[in-house]
Image (tube, rainbow, N blue to C red):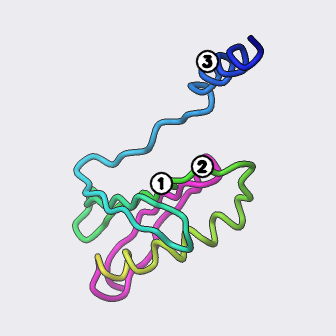
Amino acid sequence: MLPVLTLAAVVLGLPACVTSKGTLEGSRVETVRVDGRLYEVRIAPAESAGDYQLLLVRGTVVVDPDPKRESERNWNVVQPFLERTCKGPFVVLDHQLADKVNLFVRFRCGT
């Protein structure tokens, strides 16, 4: 009986632990694995010409994330996507770490 109660508690508590993935309207998604961690990278044009938005969503579960380490990892993941999108230099206009693991970046191509 105890295993059934334990399983029920886990199943009923699971929705409280699940958060929805972020989305960017008009974006395309690319899944990438870096250092054994799965990420979804979404890139979409912003309102101004030459400006873009990028959303990096961690695809693997993170228990008690360290925001500083997650931020460092995230920048290592997004750097090639920023360079590829702009085909060269870019300027970061804004960035935010959401839920201690997901990164939102607004950037402009060029210098």
> Which type of secondary structure does the marked residue at label 3 adopt?
helix
User: Which amino acid is tagged 2?
Assistant: Val
- The residue tagged 3 is 12
Q: Is 87 in the magenta? A: yes
Q: Where are the magenta residues, as a range?
A: 86-111
Disc 1 crowd rating (10 Å Cα; few below 14, some 14-19, many 20+) is: many
Identify the main secondary structure in magenta: strand
Residue 57, disc: 1
Relative horizontal placement of residue 54, taking residue 64 as reference (left or right): left
Disc 2 crowd rating (10 Å Cα; few below 14, some 14-19, many 20+) is: few
What is the CA distance from the residue labelled 2 to the residue labelled 1? Answer: 11 Å
> In this orientation, which residue lies closer to the viewer: 68 or 109?
68
Disc 3 crowd rating (10 Å Cα; few below 14, some 14-19, many 20+) is: few
For discs 2 and 1, the disc positioned in front in the rendered view: 2
Rendered residue at 46%/59% (across/down): 56
Relative horizontal placement of residue 11, taking residue 2 as reference (left or right): left
User: Which amino acid is tagged 1?
Assistant: Val
Residue 1 in percent (x, y) is at: 74, 11
Rendered residue at 48%/61% (across/down): 38
What is the CA distance from the residue labelled 3 to the residue labelled 1? Answer: 25 Å
Quadrant where the C terminus lies? bottom left
Residue 70 in percent (x, y) is at: 65, 63
- The residue tagged 2 is 61
User: Which amino acid is tagged 3?
Assistant: Leu
